[in-house]
Amino acid sequence: MKFVDEFRDAAVIKKAAEEIRRLADPQRHYRFMEVCGGHTHAIYRFGLKDLLPPNIELIHGPGCPVCVLPMGRIDDGLSMATDPNVIFTAFGDMMRVPGREGSPLEHRARGKDVRIVYSPSDALKLAQRNPDKHVMFFAIGFETTAPSTALTLLRARRLGLANFSVFCNHVTIIPAIRAILDSPDMRIDAFIGPGHVSTVIGCRPYEWIARNEHKPIAISGFEPLDILQSILMLLRQLRAGESKVENQYKRVVPWDGNLAALKALAEVFELRPYFEWRGMGFISQSALRIKPAYAAWDAEQRFRVPGIRVTDPKAAQCGEVLKGALKPVQCKLFGKECTPEHPIGALMVSSEGSCAAYYNYEHRKAPLASIENAVGVPA
Amino acid sequence: MTAAGPKIRFRDPQIEMAHGAGGKASRRLVEGLFAPLLFGSLSEPLVDAALVSINGSQVAITTDSFVVTPLRFPGGSIGELAVNGTVNDLAVSGAQAEKLVATYVLEAGLPTEILESEVRAMAQAAQNAGVSIVGGDTKVVEHGKADRMYITTTGIGRPIPGLNIRARNVCAGDKVLLSGPIGDHGITILLARGELDIEAKICSDTRSVLPFVQAIAAKAAGGVRWMRDPTRGGVATCLNELARDCDLCVTVFEERVPVHDAVRGACELLGLDPLHIANEGQFVAVIAPEYAHDALQAMHEIPGGDQSLIIGEIREKPAGTVLGSTGYGGTRVIDMLVGDPLPRIC
């Protein structure tokens, strides 16, 4: 398969891993944060940690939109689904995220009209096919998914579609990175930058990280070779004493981003003064809301949103894990009360959440690290 | 004084789609509710068919319900699945299907034309699999109380001589054989539902696997330790059940697992793992190493078996776990399916 196979080529990957081992200074401990949940998933799915020397530590960042959504927003969204005339739609990732009264899937099992869609335009089509119902789309995601929501809202306005609305939970990545850098327990040497977000926003918004914070950053693709190449870029910069933004994912990410997508975002959305991030608290200017000109399609304007706030269970240490201060397995609930089947924190729900990735792909082999290397393809 | 009843461990307050998806939740339901109340304590791991003795002769018996939507899809239909599914459950339990009975639950308003075409599909599939349908039952429910039609088939079969299929027979060093490319059925159904704007040339792999099981039995019966057809929950789920039941580690050499490009592409787009996607015409077998070559050769000699290959082997540790190893030296845990990625696929 083109654009996949060449980035999973065993010989090239082995070579990149050798180069990493050669460049990494054995006297030094490296802490690299992969910002995006897609990277976390790929690192575990492809077993990349096994290829890295032990002094390169990968810290999982906040770039999983499902994980950073506070539980209260889920309850807010589900409160709209209690109206029997409303069809609640969301991406599949959202469906198992628990609210106080259960996840969207559990609401569906109780008879609520809750449906999975694969894009906001599918939700819009559903509204067109069901003129006597109101279709609400629970929008989540960083700048990656926000443009498709924006284009859908533009289309809804053009069509004058009265039975469709969006509950906007879109967030932006840069303020989250800033919050991590501002956090006192932050000890990160460099960043593996988010690939998908950058297809929209480009590479310029990260320049301050390199310039002001002196942290190297490599915008990375999601295949094993992409991630290893990005780690190589970071090692080379650190060796040379440099800090700059490098674009490893050039085949997809333009330096200036996607101007058409940015224009659609600017047309439909404006920044919220502040927004709550699960585990990280309120971060100013870190989320999008729908502009007044599109209020007719804004679920927060059309429905009475209770504005529910739910404190996370005290024992759950999602915040520390999100910021990279704790490894998933160091959380008191990990693998005990909190599992992918019965998630307590959202990091355990989404496949991009670091806890779920760790649970699914890693933790049972962890105590047996010594035999990992013995697992290979026999001749 | 009343005797204490069996211990019910299933505590979920209501039934969710995941309880029928073949993964962890299904297993919890069966082991936590059905087994203690219906089968007493479990001395043997749960398998696809029960072996019972009637007047001293061994008979295998199994049952399966089919609720797939849409009823027809590229490569097959509910009628075909209903026959092949039960024939396959018997085959991987080491038995040759002899007789089936079928139950239809029909929604009022179902066009006769559709029913007729599904009954014809069943007749054809039964003929292909060499099994006869000897009875059945029909129930009709009000319009809106069922989704067009559901079919349940129950089959009995005769044990295939020489086969003794038990997870407990599996030893470290055994080889894991897979009959062909995985994920075709699940992805075909997903695309046939028309909810995704993805088009791909792909069709369900529904077929009887009995000829393959017979071929392996003829050449390597003594080396067959265990078999399973990886339907709901896919290869990952059935290998996890094996790992747990035999308390060993199943290692899968991931780059060897055959997946059609269309299935890989759809999985990449949708964030699914082909190892979790359902199949309806494949099986996984664990073969003693000294028989692996013969078993593979037997597969390769019959039409449709040419893509079978060894995808992994059994190791001692970590016990109870399925590990995937990449061609470049990385490993990962391959877990059972959690939740329900694909609705109503069989």
Image (cartoon, coloured by chain):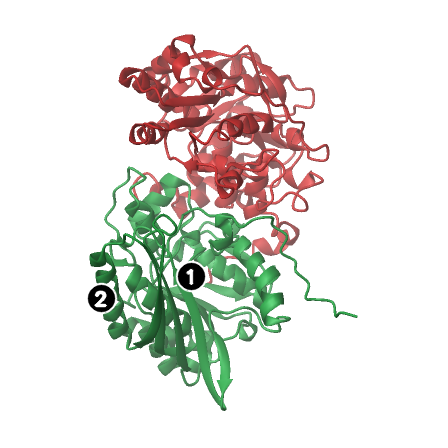
Chain colours: A red, B green
Callout 2: SS: helix
* Category of crowding for the residue at label 2, using alpha-carbon neighbours closer than 10 angstroms: few (below 14), some (14–19), many (at least 20): some
Query: Which disc is residue B230 wearing?
Result: 1
Residue at x 50%, y 23% (from the top left corner): A217
Q: Amino acid at mark 1?
A: Pro
| Labelled pair 1, 2 in contact (Cβ < 8 Å) | no
Give percent across and percent down for residue B187.
Answer: 34, 49
Q: Is residue B90 left or right of residue A28?
A: left
Give the quarter of the image for residue A356: top right
Q: Nearer the viewer, residue B343 or A126?
A: A126
At x 60% / y 35%, what residue is drawn?
A101
Q: Position of residue B261 (x, y in %)?
A: 30, 49
Question: Helix, strand or loop at disc 1?
Answer: loop
The mark found on residue A251 in the picture is none
* Residue at 33% from the left image edge and 51% from the top image edge: B69
x and y, in percent, of residue A241 in the image:
55, 20
The answer to which of B317 and B72 lies nearer the viewer is: B72
Count of residue discs: 2
Three-letter amino acid code at the position of disc 2 = Arg
Q: Position of residue B25 (x, y in %)?
A: 54, 53
Residue sitting at 43 percent across and 24 percent down?
A: A197
Indicate the chain on which mark 1 is placed: B
Q: Is residue B297 above or below residue B258?
A: below
Instruction: Return the residue found at the far bottom.
Output: B56
Residue A334 in sight from this viewpoint: yes
Front in this rendered view, residue B80 or A359: B80
**Other-residue count near label 1 (Cα within 10 Å), few / some / many at <14 / 14–19 / ≥20:** many
Q: Which mark is residue B120?
A: 2
Against A174, residue B80 (above or below) is below
